[in-house]
């Protein structure tokens, strides 16, 4: 059964999000769907031209499109300068997940020294250690552990089974997804003749406002200073951020990115999946690092795009390329000999 609170007229959506519509403004929108699968009560969108061919046959109630695509749409439209951004805003109205009511589950363990704000939710088997400060409207889901002296600012959310180690600070409205571990020791070791000595990790992790940390992502505490994520940093699942790294505001990273210790990343950067950096380098603002690429030196020019990965090829073609690559050194020596011979011939 459709929740009436999630049923809106097309004209109401247009007014709420400052968009124009074409078609029947009384059309009811009850959810979100793709162009190919949306039903007659769902809103869809077109932002990637790869899917433009699906527009002519869509059965959606309405489609978010740019003005240039409106004439191609056989159903109602919402006109947007950036359909994907408008979709992101509207989709939040149709999230089917149940909101959590304020309250503390009887199985939660909360140290008496913890400061608790109003309207917070603490789920089953959560553990909040000594000295923690929990601001208003914070959600701490089931199985979360805050070891000690952690600070959660207003309206942030730990979804489930999140671990925050000592002293971690998380800003307003930030979200941490299940399985993330924030503030564990970084990989700090010194080799003493025949064995390793652990270097105490004396810093912590500070995360800004409006950040999002993906499932099973790990962010190590600093060795001396802190590991820092500035405001509006977005991390996908299974990312590793090393100790004392700094990630600038509005930077986004896709799954399996690895950032080595003491790397300083600028603002508005983007890292594609499985990319990463070596440690102790700087990345300029608005840098883009493509899939599977590893940055091994500082990038000083803002706004550049870097790539070091080879795209997949048919196996036979790849094998031929590798065979040629194995001959590269021999070919280089041959070219040098030919260049030398050419110079000697020219000089005579």
Image (spheres, rainbow, N blue to C red):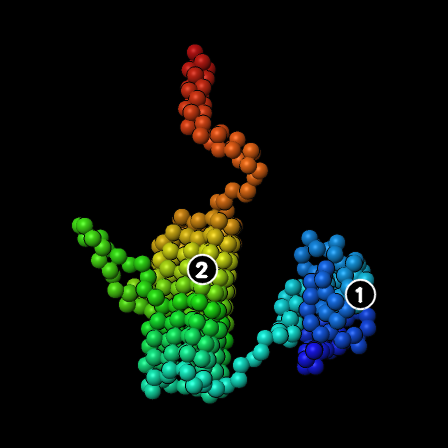
Q: Is residue 65 above or below residue 134?
A: above
Kindly identify which numbered label has been placed on residue 239.
2
Residue labelled with disc 1:
75
Percent x, y of residue 266: 45, 60
Query: Is residue 81 visible in the rendered structure shown here?
Result: no
* Local secondary structure at mark 2: loop
**Residue at (25, 61) in percent of width and height:** 199
Q: Is residue 348 above or below residue 75?
A: above
* Label 2, label 1: how far apart the Cα atoms are: 41 Å
**In terms of image quadrants, where is residue 94?**
bottom right
**Residue at (68, 74) in percent of width and height:** 17
| 43 displayed left or right of 179 | right
- Nearest the camera: 109 or 16? 109
**Residue at (45, 76) in percent of width and height:** 142
| 293 displayed left or right of 2 | left
Kindly identify which numbered label has been placed on residue 249.
none
- Nearest the camera: 103 or 164? 103
Query: Is residue 93 visible in the rendered structure shown here?
Result: yes
Name the image quarter holding the N terminus: bottom right
Percent x, y of residue 183: 36, 68
Percent x, y of residue 314: 57, 38
Percent x, y of residue 248: 45, 63
């Amino acid at each position: 059964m459709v929740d009436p609170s999630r049923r809106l007229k097309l004209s109401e959506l247009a007014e709420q999000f400052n968009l124009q519509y074409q078609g029947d403004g009384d059309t009811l929108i009850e959810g979100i769907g793709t162009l190919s699968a949306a039903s007659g009560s769902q809103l869809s969108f077109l932002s990637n031209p790869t899917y433009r061919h699906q527009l002519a046959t869509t059965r959606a109630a309405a489609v978010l499109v740019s003005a240039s695509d409106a004439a191609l749409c056989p159903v109602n439209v919402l006109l947007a300068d950036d359909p994907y951004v408008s979709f992101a805003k509207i989709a939040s109205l149709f999230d089917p997940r149940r909101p959590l009511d304020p309250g503390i589950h009887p199985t939660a363990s909360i140290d008496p020294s913890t400061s608790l704000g109003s309207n917070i939710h603490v789920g089953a088997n959560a553990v909040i250690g000594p000295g923690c400060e929990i601001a208003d409207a914070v959600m701490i889901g089931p199985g979360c552990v805050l070891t000690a002296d952690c600070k959660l600012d207003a309206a942030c959310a730990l979804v489930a089974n999140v671990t925050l180690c000592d002293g971690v600070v998380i800003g307003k409205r930030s979200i941490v997804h299940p399985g993330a571990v924030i503030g564990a020791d970084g990989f700090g070791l010194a080799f003493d003749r025949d064995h390793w000595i652990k270097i105490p990790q004396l810093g912590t992790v500070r995360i800004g406002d409006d950040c999002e940390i993906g499932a099973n992502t790990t962010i190590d505490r600093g060795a001396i200073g802190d590991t820092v994520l500035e405001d509006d940093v977005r991390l996908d699942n299974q990312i590793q951020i090393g100790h004392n790294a700094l990630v600038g505001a509005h930077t986004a990273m896709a799954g399996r990115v690895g950032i080595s210790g003491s790397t300083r990343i600028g603002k508005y950067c983007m890292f594609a999946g499985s990319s990463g950096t070596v440690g102790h380098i700087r990345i300029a603002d608005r840098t883009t690092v493509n899939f599977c690429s590893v940055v091994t030196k500082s990038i000083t020019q803002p706004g550049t795009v870097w790539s070091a990965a080879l795209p997949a090829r048919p196996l036979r073609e790849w094998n031929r390329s590798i065979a040629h690559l194995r001959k590269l050194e021999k070919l280089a020596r041959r070219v040098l000999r030919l260049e030398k011979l050419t110079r000697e011939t020219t000089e005579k």
